[in-house]
Each structure stands twice: as structure tokens, then as C-alpha cells.
Amino acid sequence: MLIDYIKKPVLFTEKTISRLENNQYTFDVIDSLTKSQIRQIFQKLYNIKSFKINSYKLNRKKIRLLASKGYKTKKKRIIISLPKTQKLPIDISLG
């Protein structure tokens, strides 16, 4: 399903909450998706036509558990900018 590619909306930081006022929504997605694939998913799921996508990969953090060392998994985060006439049906209390 298409919804499986979108991990979750990011609503827990001050920066993402302030972006909501400017119609910018932040999501964590699977890191293998391209911008064109993300555009198709959001057009089918939310029925929105014109929007802008910015994407970036988060730095991996080192973790250590007793004697073993490793890294956290990679994450890709996208920011979707919508025109003022459109909104996404996201509940702010989900974060």
C-alpha cells in the first residue's frame, strides 16, 4: 500500500509546528524514495495537485550497548509546501 512508504508525520518540534502555520508539512519516509515517487504518493493519497517537495537525509547517530557499537537506522525527511488554499488532513495531536 502507498501509506506504508510514509512512516509518520513529524509534529513534535517547535520548528515543524511553526512550519504548519505556513502550510509546510514534515514527514519521515522510506529513504529509497525519490521526489517524483513521493509526489505520486501524495497526489494519490491526499488528492493534492500543486506542491513543492524538499527532502534531506538525517545524520546517523552512534549508539553503544555495553561492548557493542553501532549506528541508528537512516532516516529521510521531507517537507511539503502547499499553497494557502490547500490543507492536508493531519491531526496535530498525533505527534
Image (tube, grey):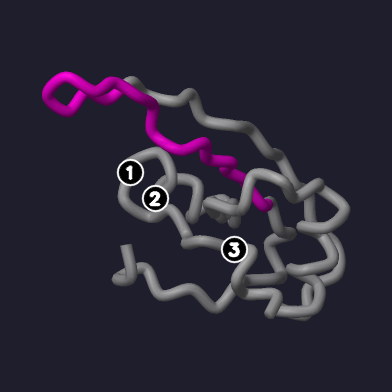
Q: Position of residue 74 (x, y in %)?
A: 52, 36
State the mark number for residue 6. Answer: 3
Q: Is residue 93 above or below residue 51?
A: below
Question: Is residue 7 toward the left or the right of residue 69 in the image?
Answer: right
Between the residue at mark 2 and the residue at mark 3, the CA separation in whole angstroms equals: 19 Å
Point out which mark residue 17 bears.
2
Q: Nearer the viewer, residue 34 or 42?
A: 34
Q: Which type of secondary structure does the marked residue at label 3 adopt?
A: strand
Q: Residue 44: image x %, image y %?
A: 80, 78
66 lies left or right of 60: left
**Which of the 4 image quadrants contains residue 15?**
top left
How many angstroms separate mark 1 from mark 3 (CA)?
18 Å
Q: Residue most toward the front?
A: 67
Q: Are marks 2 and 1 in contact (CB under 8 Å)?
A: yes
Crowd class of label 3 (few under 14; some 14 to 19; many from 20; radius 10 Å): some
Give the label, 1 or 3, closer to the camera.
3
How far is mark 2 from mark 1, CA to CA? Answer: 6 Å
Mark 1 or mark 3: name the one nearer the start of the chain: 3
Residue at the location (80% across, 47% down)? 34
Q: Is residue 67 above or below residue 44?
A: above
* Between 15 and 56, the one nearer to me in the picture: 56
Q: What residue sits right under mark 1 in the picture?
A: 13
Three-letter amino acid code at disc 1?
Thr
